Image (cartoon, rainbow, N blue to C red):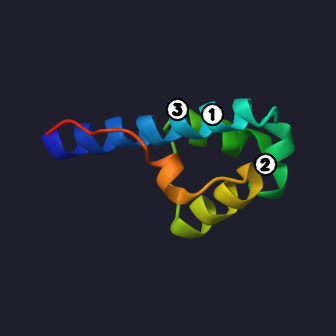
């Protein structure tokens, strides 16, 4: 169970990072609709969806950032 909790925390951190970068780019969740519909994208930002590398790539392209920028946070050991 500990691993599942850690994975959920990681997904939440990724979602928070996506939201931060989206807001810095002055984009709305609706602006991200070419990647995923509004409700799905909202769940990504809340850390409720386990996204693929393909989706990470699309998000980075849309936000004009590098993947390293998206994952620029530390996880607990």
Horizontally, residue 8 falls left or right of residue 38, namely left
- Residue 6 appears anywhere in the view: yes
For the C terminus, the quadrant is top left
Is disc 3 placed on a helix, strand or loop? helix
Is 67 rendered above or below residue 18? below
Is 7 rendered above or below residue 23? below
What percent of the width, then of the height, locates residue 33?
A: 83, 49
User: Residue at position x 52%, y 48% from top?
Assistant: 69
Q: Which mark is residue 53?
A: none
Label 2 CA crowd tier, 10 Å (few <14, some 14–19, many 20+):
few
User: Residue at position x 67%, y 36% from top?
Assistant: 42
Is disc 1 placed on a helix, strand or loop? helix
User: Residue at position x 59%, y 36% from top?
Assistant: 45
- Residue 1 appears anywhere in the view: no
Horizontally, residue 22 falls left or right of residue 34, namely left
Horizontally, residue 54 falls left or right of residue 12, namely right
For the N terminus, the quadrant is top left
User: Residue at label 2?
Assistant: 37
User: Residue at label 1?
Assistant: 19
Label 1 and label 2: CA atoms lie apart by 15 Å
Residue at the bottom extreme of this rendering:
54
Is 75 rendered above or below residue 63? above
Q: Quadrant of residue 5?
A: top left
Q: Nearer the viewer, mark 1 or mark 2?
A: 1
Q: Are marks 3 and 2 in contact (CB under 8 Å)?
A: no
User: Residue at label 3?
Assistant: 16
Q: Nearer the viewer, mark 3 or mark 2?
A: 3
């Amino acid at each position: 169970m500990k691993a599942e909790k850690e994975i959920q925390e990681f997904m939440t951190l990724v979602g928070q990072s996506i939201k931060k970068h989206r807001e810095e780019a002055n984009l709305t969740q609706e602006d991200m609709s070419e990647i995923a519909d509004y409700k799905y994208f909202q769940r990504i930002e809340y850390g409720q969806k386990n996204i693929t590398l393909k989706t990470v790539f699309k998000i980075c392209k849309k936000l004009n950032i590098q993947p390293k920028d998206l994952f620029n946070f530390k996880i607990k050991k």
